[in-house]
Image: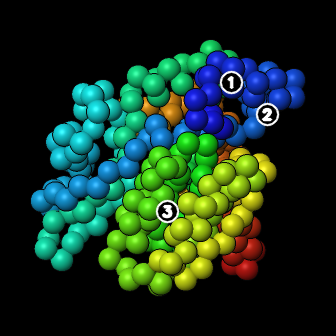
Amino acid sequence: HFPTGASLETTIASFKLSLSPLAADDAHSAPVLVVLVPAALVPRLSATLPNVPSHKLRHAAAYAIEDRLVGDIELQHLTVVDSRVASTGQVELEIASIERQWLNKLLSELDTAGLKPIAVYADADCIASKPGDVLLWIDGEDSHWITPAGLRRTWPVDALQEALDWSLGTTPAGTLGLRVHASAANLQRHRPAIDALRTRLVSIQLHELERPLDWLGRELEAARPHNLLHNEFALQQTHSERWQRWRWPLRIAAAIVVVFLAQIVLDLTMASSRAR
C-alpha cells in the first residue's frame, strides 16, 4: 500500500525487505502482489453519453470529461468502473482517471525490484459499500466517501459538509447513517466537524483504525474494486508463467481423458467377451 505522499522507492524497498528470502527470490513461490495506490491520485468523474458500443466507451468518455481534468486528457489512463443505460437511452458512466506517467513509473519501480503485481487498485475502492449508510474514511488530509449505491469521491478533509451534500444527493435528511473510519488522532482532530453533520443523519458511528491496510484487505473481496491494469497496462504473462498457471488444470484434464479412454477400452473388452 502506497500511502498518500509516500516515496515509491522507499515503500517498495520496505515491502521487499518484509518478504521472506524464498518468496523474494522465487517467482513461483512468491505471494500474489496487489498494489494499493492513494485514491486521491485516481479521481472519479461522472459522464452521460449517447448510447455507444461498449468498445468505444473509453474513447467517448475521454471527450466527455476532458474539460474537468487538470492537464492533457491524452496523458490520463481511464477506467470505466460502471456504465448503465438510463431511461432516456443515454449511458451513465463512472470513470476513474490516473496519470499514465505516474502509473508507468510505479510499474517500472516494481519491475526493477523484481515485483510483478496482478492488480493495482485505488485504496478507497477497496471499501465495500453498505446499504443504508454513507461511509467515510479520513486518511490524513483526504476524506473518502462511499454512498450506499457504491459511488465514490475523494474530498479535502476540511470540506466535510460539501462532501456530505454530494453523498446524500436527493436523499432526504435524516434517512441515512454515517460510518466514519479513521485513526484515533484523526477522529479526535475532526470530531467537532463530524458532530456538526449529525442533524442531517440518522446516526453516526465512529470506528477507530489502527492498521488501515488490514481493514482494506478484509473489505477487498466484498468491494470488488476495478483493476487499473488494463489495455496498455494489462498484465503480460511469459510462457513459463502461463505454463505454471495452467499446469494443474491441464494435468487434471489429462487424467480425465485417460480415465475416459480406459472406460471405453473396458466397455469394448466386456462387449467382446459377451459376444463370444
Residue that appears at 71% across and 55% down: 188
Residue 88 is left or right of residue 212, and the answer is: left
Secondary structure under the numbered disc 1 in the rendered image: helix
**C-alpha distance separating marks 1 and 2:** 19 Å
- In the picture as drawn, the residue positioned furthest to the right comes out as 21
- Residue 97 is situated, as x and y percent measured from the top left of the image, at 37, 40
Q: Amino acid at mark 3?
A: Ile
Q: Which residue is mark 2?
A: 29
Residue 214 is left or right of residue 253, and the answer is: right
Residue that appears at 33% across and 56% down: 94
Using a 10 Å C-alpha cutoff, classify the residue at mark 1 as few (fewer than 14 neighbours), some (14 to 19) or many (20 or more): some
Q: Amino acid at mark 1?
A: Ile
Could you tell which of marks 2 and 3 lies nearer the N-terminus?
2
Residue 118 visible, this orientation = no
**C-alpha distance separating marks 1 and 3:** 29 Å
Q: Marks 1 and 2: CB-CB under 8 Å?
A: no
Residue that appears at 48% across and 58% down: 160
Instruction: Decide which of 128, 52 is in the foreground and name it.
Output: 128
Could you tell which of marks 1 and 2 lies nearer the N-terminus?
1
Q: Quadrant of the C terminus?
A: bottom right
Instruction: Decide which of 272, 94 is in the foreground and name it.
Output: 94
- Residue 54 is situated, as x and y percent measured from the top left of the image, at 24, 54
Q: Which residue is mark 1?
A: 12
Q: Marks 1 and 3: CB-CB under 8 Å?
A: no
Using a 10 Å C-alpha cutoff, classify the residue at mark 3 as few (fewer than 14 neighbours), some (14 to 19) or many (20 or more): many
Residue 112 vertical position relative to residue 82 in the rendered view, above or below? above
Q: Amino acid at mark 2?
A: Ser
Q: Which residue is mark 3?
A: 146
Q: Quadrant of the N terminus?
A: top right
Secondary structure under the numbered disc 2 in the rendered image: loop
Using a 10 Å C-alpha cutoff, classify the residue at mark 2 as few (fewer than 14 neighbours), some (14 to 19) or many (20 or more): few
